[in-house]
Image (cartoon, rainbow, N blue to C red):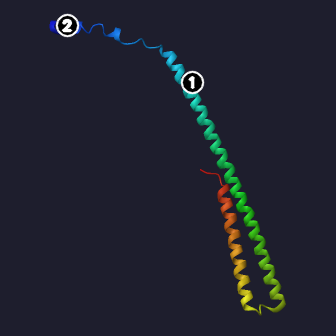
Amino acid sequence: MPLLLSLLQGYADFRATIPKMPEISNVKNALQTIVKKDRLLNALLAGGKSLVFSIGRTFYAFWLQATGLIFLMFTLGGVVSLVRHYRIDHFADHKRFTIECAFTLVCALFTLQSFLRARRTLRPRK
């Protein structure tokens, strides 16, 4: 034990080699300032991202509804043409009848798909 104490006496003044630490409250305040600035920046970025995605989703739904309306007009035009040709000659021109039916059916499917996608886009996310 006396040998251990004699060895430690040379190292007894080790605290003099450590620089004085600043007050913990100063360090804490500096860190809080950095974190608050970072929080503010993160909050602004998160809010901006939410705003951009919300506006984008709304614009996309509007685009889908507008294209759905255009396809609805094409579908109604096809139906009117089919009715007109039925009244005139009871679909004597089978080739024209087939093309008009296909056109009307495709436009009706595009209309339905466009409005369904718009509805799904505007649905609130869980």
Secondary structure category for the residue under label 2:
helix
Residue annotated with mark 2: 5
The amino acid type of the residue labelled 2 equals Leu
Q: Is residue 30 above or below residue 51?
A: above
Residue 114 in the figure: left or right of residue 74: left
| Label 1 Cα crowd, 10 Å radius (few <14 / some 14-19 / many 20+) | few
Checking the image for residue 70, the label placed there is none
Residue 103 in the figure: left or right of residue 4: right
Judge by depth and name the residue closer to the eye, 113 or 7. Answer: 7
The amino acid type of the residue labelled 1 equals Thr
Residue at 72% across / 60% down in the picture?
A: 63
| Label 2 Cα crowd, 10 Å radius (few <14 / some 14-19 / many 20+) | few
Secondary structure category for the residue under label 1:
helix
Residue 53 in the figure: left or right of residue 80: left
Q: Position of residue 76 (x, y in %)?
A: 78, 75
Residue annotated with mark 1: 33
Q: Position of residue 108 (x, y in %)?
A: 71, 73
